Image: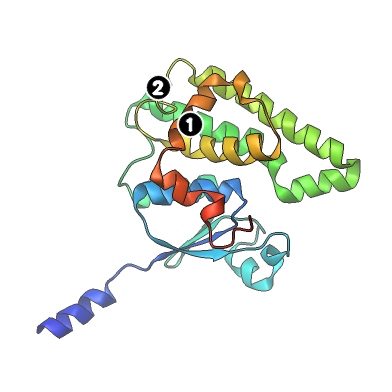
Amino acid sequence: MNTHNQENADESFKPPKLVLYSNWQSSCSWRVRFALNLKGISYEYKAVDLRKGEQYTAEFEKINPMPLVPTLVDGDIMVSDSFAILLYLEEKYPQKALLPRNPRLKALNLQAASIISSSIQPLQMWNVQKYIEEKAGPEERLSCARYAIERGFQALEKLLENVATRYATGDEVCLADVFLAPQIANDATLRLQIDMAKFPTLRRINESCKTLAEYKASSPENQPDAMI
């Protein structure tokens, strides 16, 4: 095969670029962007304007019947929900592993991620916040969000205080950090003004993450759809 044909053959077998449907303000989207950057995976960013209701369009519904971001498209595979996406990425793209091999540390990472995904995040969701405000008013909306995040942070502080060093479970960035950092920066301190002095371990982990180039590149203000 000549060089030209070889190049064409190589091109035809080139894996498709991943597509991430994201919103710059979404903490769930941020954690996926952070993980993709840590793993060195290039992707196409497709913005979804949640306030304009673009998540409810027929086009988006074909991709994700649950009108939420993020959604990842990898060839003919579509994955929604940030936790599911991150576990998919960990299996499909094992470089820069986010789950330690040590069973105890792996369990801690999964537990921390689950606390954020299942116990904290639901009451931070834009559609849930909007529903609470419509039914009970803006004060109740904020009260519910603060209650969920402070209760979750109390559990995370106890879970990680004796194992965290530079990052949540040691000196390497892992899944717990990918979940924690956006939750602290975006929801806790920016939107809800939570006093992170009450959670010194979590605050220290977040400060470590903030120094990473992958964190900075995935931050809301650096996204194509950012409106600062």
Q: Earlier in the sequence, mark 2 or mark 1?
A: 2
Q: Quadrant location of residue 7?
A: bottom left
The residue where tag 2 is placed is: 165
| 119 to 30, vertically: above or below | above
Query: Would you call the spot at circle 1 few (<14 residues within 10 Å), some (14-19), or many (20 or more)?
Result: some
Of the pair 165 and 1, the residue shown nearer to us: 165
Query: Would you call the spot at circle 2 few (<14 residues within 10 Å), some (14-19), or many (20 or more)?
Result: some
x then y, percent, for residue 18:
42, 63
| 97 to 89, vertically: above or below | above
- Residue 87 at least partly seen: no
- Residue 166 at least partly seen: yes
The three-letter code of the residue at mark 2 reads: Thr
- The structure residue drawn at horizontal position 69% and vertical position 41%, both measured from the top left corner, is 124
Q: Quadrant location of residue 137?
A: top right
Pick out the residue farthest to the top: 162
The three-letter code of the residue at mark 1 reads: Glu
x then y, percent, for residue 195:
66, 25
x then y, percent, for residue 73:
48, 63
**Residue 207 image label:** 1
Question: Horizontally, is 144 left or right of 116 in the view?
Answer: right
| 34 to 172, vertically: above or below | below
Question: Horizontally, is 26 left or right of 209 in the view?
Answer: right
